[in-house]
Amino acid sequence: MILVTGGAGFIGANFVLDWVAASAEPVLNLDALTYAGNLESLGSLAGNPRHRFVQGDIADRPLLDRLMAEHRPRAVVHFAAESHVDRSIHGPGAFIKTNVEGTFTLLEATRAHWAQLPATEKAAFRFHHVSTDEVYGSLGPGDPAFTEAHPFEPNSPYSASKAASDHLVRAWHHTYGLPVVTTNCSNNYGPYHFPEKLIPLMIVNALAGKPLPVYGDGQQVRDWLYVKDHCSAIREVLARGRVGETYNVGGWNEKPNIEIVQTVCALLDEMRPSAAGPHARLITFVADRPGHDRRYAIDARKIERELGWKPAETFETGIRKTVRWYLDNADWVAHVQSGAYRDWVATQYSERASA
């Protein structure tokens, strides 16, 4: 069994769904179900004996100790994190609690579990820490992309808290020998994305005829990674990555935000045209966020060189699949927007909300 933290969030839920589809190995899924945790995303797994859900906090040491003792996971895949930059600016405390204190508590519980394993299980154990390219800071227009050796220069409370968690994971390996691997990914997009992030926000606002807010001049550049490609990379690193190493995971898709928004509008014009005219008419430039990083770019050659991984989707294929998914899953979107998705715990998982 593997233990996945944050497995009801956007990337975590996609990973759990892909894992259960591709593997016979069960998943113990621990998630605190904060606002972005949505068990409705895992609705297809309701009643599946290979998915065991537990509602709980990674900062709850007694709970972690009990789960480790009862289920004896052979790996931990750590997604659980507060992840929205704007929210970190307005309320940084939650980011320190989850991303720093929570990761520390999880590392300590994992270390205690790992230390008492038999020698063969101890050698095979892995702690996979899922992180972000934002820890590296911001790039100039002509700067080379982030490699794994790039210094950390976080610029927001969110990225600073993730950088701290990366350092903790590294230290627990070098000090205690805990067998860890870390991945730093670029901007993910795809199904089940909470509609506060750029792409799903543009889709749901455009469909509702609402303004499409674009920060500043819209020229902030990001590398875009389809979430299912990210999940496949995590599986490869978990299985074959070198202990103690970091692997950058990117989509080789550097694009300015305004181009992303225009692409979404063009796809909606094709798939769901509006009688009021092209969706791009709704684009509205708004004041930029404080300290907004100008450019991120991932150099993902190490993971390709060592593990043979590269993304299967281009941005053109991935964004088309993403827009189509949101059009085909209007109920999921409506439940997220209304908050009704929280009822999913009571209606579908009431008997399995704790282990």
Image (spheres, rainbow, N blue to C red):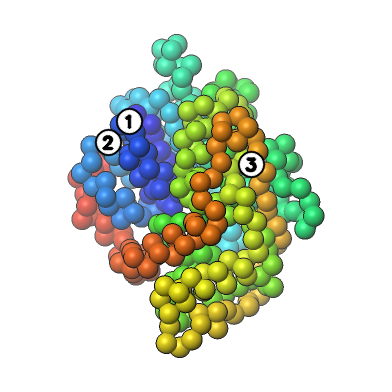
In terms of secondary structure, where does tag 1 sit?
loop
- Report the quarter where the C terminus lies: top left
User: Closest to the observer: 344 or 62?
Assistant: 344
Closer to us: mark 3 or mark 1? 3
Q: Which is more N-terminal, label 3 or label 2?
A: 2
Residue 135 image point, x, y percent: 66, 46
Instruction: Residue at 57% x, 75% y: name it.
Output: 213
Picture quadrant where residue 4 is located = top left
Instruction: Residue at 30% x, 67% y: name it.
Output: 331
Q: CA distance from mark 2 to mark 3?
A: 32 Å
* Tag shown at residue 300: 3
> In this rendering, does residue 100 appear at all?
no
- Report the quarter where the N terminus lies: top left
User: Closest to the observer: 346 or 215?
Assistant: 215
Assess disc 1: are there few (<14), some (14-19) or many (≥20) residues with their C-alpha within 10 Å of its C-alpha. few
User: Closest to the observer: 221 or 81?
Assistant: 221
Residue furthest to the top = 119
> In this rendering, does residue 51 appear at all?
yes
In terms of secondary structure, where does tag 3 sit?
loop
User: Could you tell me if the residues under marks 2 and 1 are in contact, i.e. CB atoms within 8 Å?
Assistant: yes
Please, what is the three-letter code of the amino acid marked with disc 2? Arg
Residue highlighted by disc 2: 50
Q: Which is more N-terminal, label 1 or label 2?
A: 1
Q: CA distance from mark 2 to mark 1?
A: 7 Å
User: Closest to the observer: 197 or 162?
Assistant: 197
